[in-house]
Image: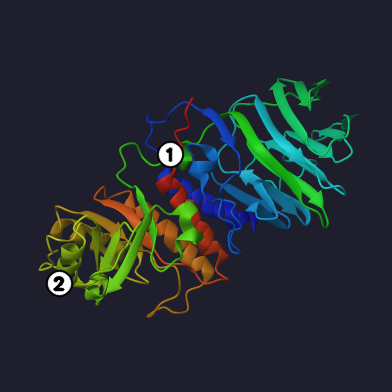
């Protein structure tokens, strides 16, 4: 699972990294874990990041263990982990010296903050590939560990939850837990220039919680849109808005080949309509002149004679199973034939003919392939996707990650 997650993260980073010389200075990071849409597929981990983080798009990857939830109705407004040893990694490294969080360890387990120069760790405090492990038990017991060094133990007054701050300075750790200070001399200095942050827990049956995560400085360059990018829309076709509100900013109704059905109806809160024909675009625009109209055509229809009707504000195409070169050719042709309109890409979210045998992994990769392509063509301003089958958790996760980039702004204020 770790290899798969890092492969996806590397692919996403390769698609979105900003050009050399355009990097901004690292800046503070905060996640309050509020407002995420908790669904059976993605469990809220990477949902609604812009709201949670203020400015956002810094995603998380589960790297070990059982189940990870954000804003679970049973534990709202928090990151919760349960099921043996479990850990998540932030997909951007810390570049400062201070990290803080509110930790609530399970009564029969522990919570941890782990820092390491490796992005390939499972995030356990005792791993040999980490630079510092901090472990906190529900009874106030503390363990600070480094590879090859004796574990430093301490304790604080037991509480229901603990406000923890770690400040690093070479071989010194300034630790504060619920106002109680500990100055700990480490066996080895911890280089703070670029450290991956892992949040973890250990409990066979009870959830541990993390809230109010703060990092003094975070380098989120690899999760950004390119400067000047026109990419700004991420919408779903055929999904309940309540299920996708945290990773969608476009509410469109697909009227297909029956645009006349919209006549006389009220569509409060709807941004616009999807139509399949020029006549449909004209009719819907007549009924709703203030709404956007997206004309969707088959990829094969985009040839040297293709024209878009003036009533269409946006144009997009669907071409299931198409490879990179085929899609790029089609995108270039559409940009050539429709020079005066904004364009959309529509990556498939479920197996479709003529390749109904596509797997979850195949379709997850498709989301990143489209992301890589869209950034080469500034006329394309967004994605319109479809919900994924219930068992396709990797594809759903990929959609959330792409949406985080499109909707968030990882240029953290600082």
Q: Which residue is drawn at 82% across and 37% down?
A: 136
User: How far is mark 2 from mark 1, CA to CA?
Assistant: 38 Å
Residue 58 percent across, percent down from the top left: 53, 42
Residue 368 percent across, percent down from the top left: 43, 56
Q: Which residue is drawn at 45% across and 61% down?
A: 241
Q: Is mark 2 on a helix, strand or loop?
A: helix
- Closer to the eye: label 2 or 1: 2
Q: Can residue 195 be seen in this view?
A: no
Q: Which residue is drawn at 44% across and 66% down?
A: 239
Tell me the residue that label 2 is attached to.
279
83 lies left or right of 227:
right
Q: Which residue is drawn at 55% across and 39% down?
A: 92
Above or below for 274 versus 2: below
Label annotation for residue 409: 1
Q: Can residue 237 be seen in this view?
A: yes
Q: Is mark 1 on a helix, strand or loop?
A: loop
Pick the front one: 198 or 78: 78
| Quadrant holding the N terminus | bottom right
């Amino acid at each position: 699972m770790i290899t798969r997650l890092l492969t996806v993260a590397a692919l996403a980073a390769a698609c979105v990294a900003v050009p050399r010389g355009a990097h901004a200075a690292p800046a503070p990071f905060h996640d309050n874990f509020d407002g995420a849409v908790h669904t059976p597929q993605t469990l809220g981990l990477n949902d609604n990041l812009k709201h949670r983080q203020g400015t956002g798009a810094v995603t998380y990857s589960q790297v070990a263990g059982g189940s990870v939830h954000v804003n679970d109705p049973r534990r709202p407004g928090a990151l919760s982990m349960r099921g043996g040893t479990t850990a998540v990694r932030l997909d951007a490294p810390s570049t400062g010296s201070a990290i803080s969080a509110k930790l609530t360890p399970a009564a029969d387990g522990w919570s941890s903050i782990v820092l390491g120069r490796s992005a390939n760790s499972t995030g356990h405090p005792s791993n040999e590939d980490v630079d510092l492990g901090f472990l906190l038990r529900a009874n106030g017991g503390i363990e600070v560990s480094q590879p090859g060094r004796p574990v430093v133990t301490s304790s604080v007054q037991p509480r229901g939850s603990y406000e923890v701050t770690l400040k690093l300075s070479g071989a010194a750790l300034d630790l504060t837990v619920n106002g109680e200070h500990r100055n700990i001399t480490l066996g080895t200095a911890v280089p703070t220039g670029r450290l991956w942050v892992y949040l973890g827990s250990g409990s066979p049956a009870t959830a541990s919680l993390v809230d109010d995560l703060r990092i003094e400085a975070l380098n989120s360059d690899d999760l950004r849109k390119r400067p000047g990018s026109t990419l700004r829309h991420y919408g779903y076709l055929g999904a309940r808005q309540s299920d996708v509100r945290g990773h969608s900013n476009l509410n469109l109704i697909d009227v297909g080949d029956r645009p006349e059905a919209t006549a006389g109806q009220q569509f409060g809160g709807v941004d616009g309509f999807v139509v399949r024909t020029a006549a449909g675009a004209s009719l819907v625009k007549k009924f709703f002149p203030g709404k956007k109209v997206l004309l969707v055509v088959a990829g094969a229809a985009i040839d040297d004679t293709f024209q878009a009707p003036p009533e269409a504000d946006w144009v997009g195409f669907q071409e299931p199973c198409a490879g990179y070169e085929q899609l790029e050719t089609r995108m270039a042709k559409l940009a050539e034939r429709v020079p005066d309109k904004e364009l959309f890409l529509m990556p498939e979210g479920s197996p479709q003919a003529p390749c109904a045998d596509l797997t979850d992994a195949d379709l997850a990769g498709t989301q990143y392939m489209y992301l890589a392509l869209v950034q080469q063509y500034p006329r394309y301003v967004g994605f319109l996707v479809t919900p994924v089958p219930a068992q396709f958790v990797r594809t759903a996760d990929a959609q959330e990650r792409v949406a985080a980039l499109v909707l968030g702004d990882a240029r953290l204020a600082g």
